[in-house]
Amino acid sequence: MGVDLGQVVKEVRKQVKLEYFTNRKLAIDAYNALYQFLAIIRGEGGEPLMDSRGRVTSHLSGLFYRTVNLLEKGIEVVYVFDGKPPELKQAEIEKRVQMREKAAELYVEAVKRGDKEGARKYAMLSTRLMDYMVEDAKRLLDLMGVPWVQAPSEGEAEAAYLAVKGFVWAAVSQDYDSLLFGSPRLVRNLTISGRRKLPGKDVYIEVVPEIVPLKELLEHLGITREQLVDIGIMLGTDYNPGGFKGIGPVKALKLIKTYGKLERIPDIKDRLKEIDYESIRKIFLEPKTADPDKDLILGELDEEGIKRFLCDVHDFSEQRVKNAVERVKAKRKVKSTTLEQWFT
């Protein structure tokens, strides 16, 4: 879930068109994106896309066609996969598992009573990313020539590190944690931009990418990154879910600007004793990260390999896959020709 900084960042976030990122390289939180695809790409009754052998393919469909769309617009991407989570995250992980199991039960009940809207809602909430899905995603990226990185711990921390070190221009995630991890820029809505239906309503909205620049945010709020982390702790993070009851974004910001840091805030001294706030700070300010062990450059498309994997193994439409591959090839051909003209 991550920390909810939406109300805090609203004054500095900038909405842009997808083309804004042309010729930029972005690090995408892979788990975050795959969960989005699994939740969104479903049938009318909430059922995920599956191949003829009953294997879920929603994540592969989203990953393939969205990545093709980005590559076609000249946007280079690097997917970052989660490693071993910090121990402090275990409680949140267990809570999510329980919520998904309950949602799965409610989904079955909704299907039995013919409640399509309820079935879709609970199906989305019961979404689980299995190990085989992650491995399939990595295999597909390899076939597409798209680089990916295995993070030593949190994927968002690694994506932020890649942005800080200049390997990429920004970190991409729906969560705001990348800012707490120090990414100079956070990009949201990249993998879900477009027309989207509001849950439970027959209403559609246009979702557009947005950028949240860390430096501008801190200057606008008049705080440091360390203080932003303290605000996050009060609001609630994956390492202290729920945060401090009765403290929202506006109050948290006011408290930090008044007292400077968590330990100096009189009203929360007792609640601070209940969490390991120093360790939470360290997770954000000194996260486990590593330099990539390979060049983060776009490789060659394995056209035949993509066809075998998506069409022969997972029953994707051969014509749709072929058309998508041709779009990427056409873009690369134009880029290659342009470069040749530049150097001749």
Image: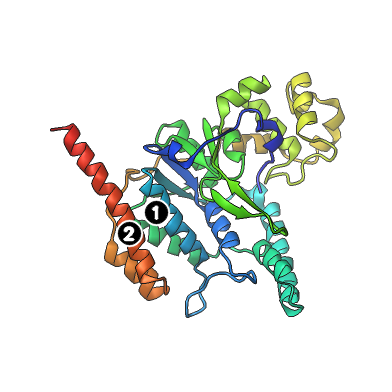
State the residue at coordinates (62%, 39%). Answer: 176
Sort mark 1 into few (<14), some (14-19) or many (20+) by Cα contacts within 10 Å: some
Q: Is residue 299 visible?
A: no
- The kind of residue tagged 1 is Val
Q: Which mark is residue 325?
A: 2
Identity, as a three-letter code, of the amino acid under mark 2: Val
Quarter holding the C terminus is: top left
Residue 213, x across and y down, in percent: 55, 29
Location of residue 338 (image quadrant): top left
**Residue 330 position within the rendered picture, expressed as x and y whole percent measured from the top left:** 28, 51
Q: Residues within 10 Å of mark 2 (few under 14, many from 20)?
A: many
Q: Residue at x 49, y 65 (%)?
A: 133
Q: Nearer the viewer, residue 13 or 263?
A: 13
Q: Is residue 287 above or below residue 259?
A: below
Relative height, residue 144 to residue 189 (above, below) = below
Q: Left or right: 90 with respect to 316?
A: right
| Mark sitting on residue 68 | 1
Q: Secondary structure at mark 1?
A: helix
Name of the residue lying farthest toward the left:
344
Q: Name the element at disc 2.
A: helix
Q: Is residue 112 left or right of residue 306?
A: right
Position in image of residue 256 (x %, y %) = 75, 24
| The one of 262 and 169 positioned closer to us in this rendering | 169
